[in-house]
Image (cartoon, rainbow, N blue to C red):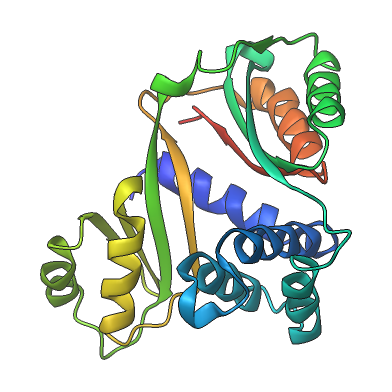
Amino acid sequence: MGRAFEYRKAAKEKRWGKMSRIFPKLGKAITMAAKEGGGDPAMNASLRTAIANAKGQNMPKDNIDAAIKRATAKDASDYAEVNYEGKGPSGVLVFVECATDNSTRTVANVRMHFNKFDCPLVPTGSLEFMFSRKAVFEINRTDEMDVEEMELELIDAGLEEIIADEDTIYIHGDFTQFGNLSTAIENLGIEVVKASLERFPTQEVEFSDEQMVDIEKLIDRLEDDDDVQAVYTNIA
């Protein structure tokens, strides 16, 4: 596994570790999935995934149930997915995924975070080609698992890569194959800890420790924003 993968893994663990912030974000994902495809997890793959992610972060069942109920409430917020792109400190490329019920508020907040570092947002779509979107599944590795056999079983479902360490297996595929891979993993009787659509830089750039200070400050500000669901960069 390369340095870039390890950095993304560490950054993701740091992000998911902010429980005071992550529970509302997980709840929002559940509400959006339930509103889009219905509140029955058995009939809604997106909702099953959102619930699995929440359980993987020890989100209480009452919180999960409340998030599903919010989708059918008369005063339920109408969330939309919006993306913003910018160039951060030292020229780092930053792709920000948001879920919001007020895009005017959200873009103002995101722009404010970038402005703190005298950095600009760029027109939507400017950085799209600099990132490839992947379906990513994380599962706990057990002694009984045969990674090579798993790879063969999942190739027809759209598998592109399996990355395994002592405790965890990461399954990657093109984002269009998310549903196929999710079903195939379920059919193998494997429990998914986390599942998501993530963006990976097509060209990674190394930054010095000194440059990373302000870069990480910007990322922290963005990830602490209630409307921000995920932040991606081209850091190597």
Q: How many marks?
A: 0
Q: Quadrant of residue 218?
A: top right
Seen at 32% across and 54% down, the residue is 172
Q: Using the rendered image of the protein, determine whether residue 97 is visible from the camera's viewpoint.
A: no
**Residue 195 screen position, x and y as percent:** 47, 63
Q: Nearer the viewer, residue 160 or 37?
A: 37
**What residue is rendered at 35% in x and 44% in y?**
2
**Vertical arrangement, residue 69 with respect to residue 217, above or below:** below
Q: Kindly identify the residue that appears in the image at 74 percent across and 85 percent down.
A: 61
The residue nearer to you, when weighing 76 against 109, is 76
Quarter of the image with the C terminus is top left
Residue placed furthest toward the front: 74
Q: Is residue 180 left or right of residue 66?
A: left
Residue 90 figure quarter: top right
Q: Is residue 95 left or right of residue 166?
A: right
| Closer to us: 128 or 93 | 128
Taking the image as shown, residue 60 lies to the left or right of residue 83, namely: right
On the image, the x and y values in percent for residue 138 come to: 43, 67
Instruction: Specify the quadrant of the image occupied by residue 151.
Output: bottom left
Image height of 46 relative to 115, above or below: below
**Residue shown at 12%/62% (left/top)?**
156
Coordinates of residue 35 in the picture (x, y in percent)? 66, 61
Q: In the picture provided, is 12 more to the left or to the right than 174?
A: right
